[in-house]
Image (spheres, rainbow, N blue to C red):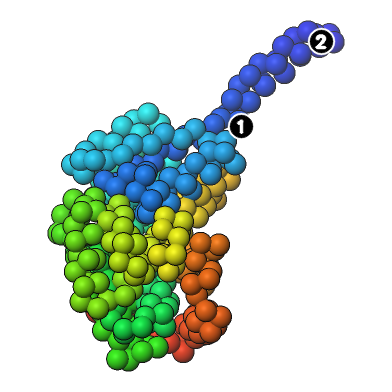
Amino acid sequence: MSPNPLRFVLRLILLQVLVVPVAFAQLKVGLVLDKGGKDDKSFNTAAFVGATRAQKELGIDLKYVEASDLNALENFHRGFARKKFDLIIGVGFAQADAVKKVAAQFPEQKFAVVDAEVSAPNVRALLFEEHEGSFLVGALAALTSKSGKLGFIGGMDIPLIRRFEMGYSAGAKKVNPKATVTVNYIGVTGDAWNNPTKAKELALAQFSGGVDVTFVAAGASGAGAFEAAATQKKFVIGVDSNQNWMRPGTVLTSMLKRVDVAVFDTIRDVKEGKFQAGVARFGLKDKGIDYAVDEHNEKLITPEAKAKLEQLRADILAGKIKVPDYYQTKK
């Protein structure tokens, strides 16, 4: 008996109905931003930029939350996990415990966390060599300063930001051994990332003491220091994302921490079936860390200074310069 052509066609259609939704299912990504929120023009903004780029270029279904209350982090992650999001990304060191706990409860789903090392078979830790980029902007600060007095303003006093500070000071002293660095921190709680008034106060105090270039690693608080620098006609160095545009002529450069690239690459890896758990590090060698030069600040950096920075970069990559790492001093 010959096969029934109609039955054969119906079976093909049924097969397509079963297969097509799986093959073309939209990747669901949940992004948990920390207290600074997507508009901090710094760390969180960079993560959000990377995720929205993936939304446009890769066609993902993106949802995000801003954790104004850090005690709610675990609930945010668990909420995404229960809704079967394919990838859940936590932005910031404060999310380590939440990611670790929820990832263990949902082993079939993938997680990523920025600035925290979480060891689990379904978690990728996105870490950066902040001290390397800080070294270069420290060198630029010393090359630009007329007083030899530099400043550093950190947000929350934690090892991560001490890492920025140490690299910055080392870079400054590499090109000017007599340079001094005045160091201030805004606070010891998460509120330190959202206190521009305090940052402005600290910056003004530094400038009144002779500082003419200060590096601000303080999240959304940095806007206050930028304002102070503009009014006092001093220089400030931005952090994480390119902040040169915020105060053209005042922002000497920005120490780029390409959280946007790390987030985008992780999403793409999940979409392409290439996700691997473990630690992914980003530094000078792969331009995961850099300093920004664009139309807003290119006239502020002399050709001689640029050449010196590129030589320092080459020496770091060649192993001729060992940039001190705060993390290593704590071991």
Q: Residue furthest bottom?
A: 177
132, above or below 39, in the image: below
Looking at the rendered structure, the secondary structure element under dot 1 is helix
Q: In this figure, which residue is indicated by the disc labeled 2?
A: 5
Which percent across, then down, holds residue 105? 29, 40
Nearer to me, 228 or 186: 228
Q: Residues within 10 Å of mark 1 (few under 14, many from 20)?
A: few
Which secondary structure lies at badge 2? helix
**Residue under the point 54% across and 47% down:** 268
Q: Label 1, on which residue? A: 23
Q: Nearer the viewer, residue 82 or 204?
A: 204
Q: Would you place residue 71 above or below residue 183 in this image?
A: above
Asked whether residue 271 is in view, the answer is yes
Between 191 and 109, the one nearer to me in the picture: 191
Q: Position of residue 226 (x, y in %)?
A: 33, 60
Disc 2 or disc 1, which is closer to the eye? 1
Instruction: Name the residue: 37% across, 80% down.
Output: 145
Position of the N terminus, as image quadrant, is: top right
Residue type of the residue flagged with mark 2: Pro
- At a point 34% along the width and 48% down the height, the residue shown is 40
Q: Position of residue 326 (x, y in %)?
A: 27, 75
Residue 196 placed where, x, y %? 24, 53
Residue at point 43%, 41% (across, down): 87
